[in-house]
Amino acid sequence: MNDLIAGDQYRFPVLNQHNQSNISVQGETATIEFRMVVEVGTAVVRARQTHCITLMSDQGHILPADVLTTSENRVLLALRDTVMQHQDYALISMVPTHAR
C-alpha cells in the first residue's frame, strides 16, 4: 500500500457490463466472481479488504473504492460507483479497513 499516495492521479478504462465482476465484501473478506468463460464452473477469488479509498475527479465526482489483496498478494480495486468517462481521478483519502 506504500504505492498509494494522496494526490496520485488515475484514469480508469470504461468497461461494458459483460466484463465487470461481481464483488461482495463482508467484513474484511471479499469474494470476487469474474464474468468470463471458463471450462468448468466459475472463476472465483477470495481476497481480504485492506483499505477504503476515496478518489475525486476534476469535475468533483466522488468515487469510493475498496482495496482488496488476494492470497497471492495481488492487489485489486473494487469501485463502488460508475467511473465518469475521460476523467482523471485523484486519491484524496485512504483509510485502513481495521481503522474504520
Image (cartoon, rainbow, N blue to C red):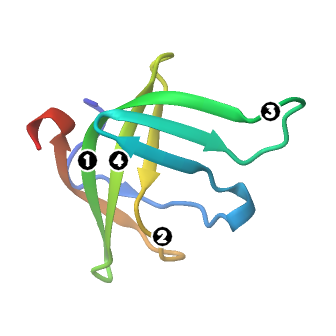
Say the numbered circle drawn on residue 38: none
The amino acid type found where label 4 is placed reads Asp
Cα–Cα span, label 2 and label 4: 14 Å
Report which residue position mark 1 lands on.
52
Residue 28 place in picture, x, y as percent: 30, 34
**Residue under the point 25% across and 47% down:** 52
Seen as rendered, the residue at the extreme right is 39
Residues packed near mark 1 inside 10 Å, few (<14), some (14 to 19) or many (20 plus): many
The amino acid type found where label 2 is placed reads Val
Going from the N terminus, do you reach mark 4 or mark 3 first? 3
Report which residue position mark 4 lands on.
66
Cα–Cα span, label 4 and label 3: 26 Å
Residue 65 place in picture, x, y as percent: 35, 54
Compared across the picture, whether 73 is left or right of 60 comes to right
Going from the N terminus, do you reach mark 1 or mark 3 first? 3
Q: Is residue 36 visible?
A: yes
**Residue under the point 27% across and 80% down:** 60
Tell which tag, 1 or 3, sits nearer the viewer.
Answer: 3
Compared across the picture, whether 38 is left or right of 46 comes to right
Cα–Cα span, label 1 and label 3: 30 Å
**Viewer-proximal residue, 45 or 53?**
45
Residue 57 place in picture, x, y as percent: 33, 73
Compared across the picture, whether 17 is left or right of 52 comes to right
The amino acid type found where label 1 is placed reads Cys
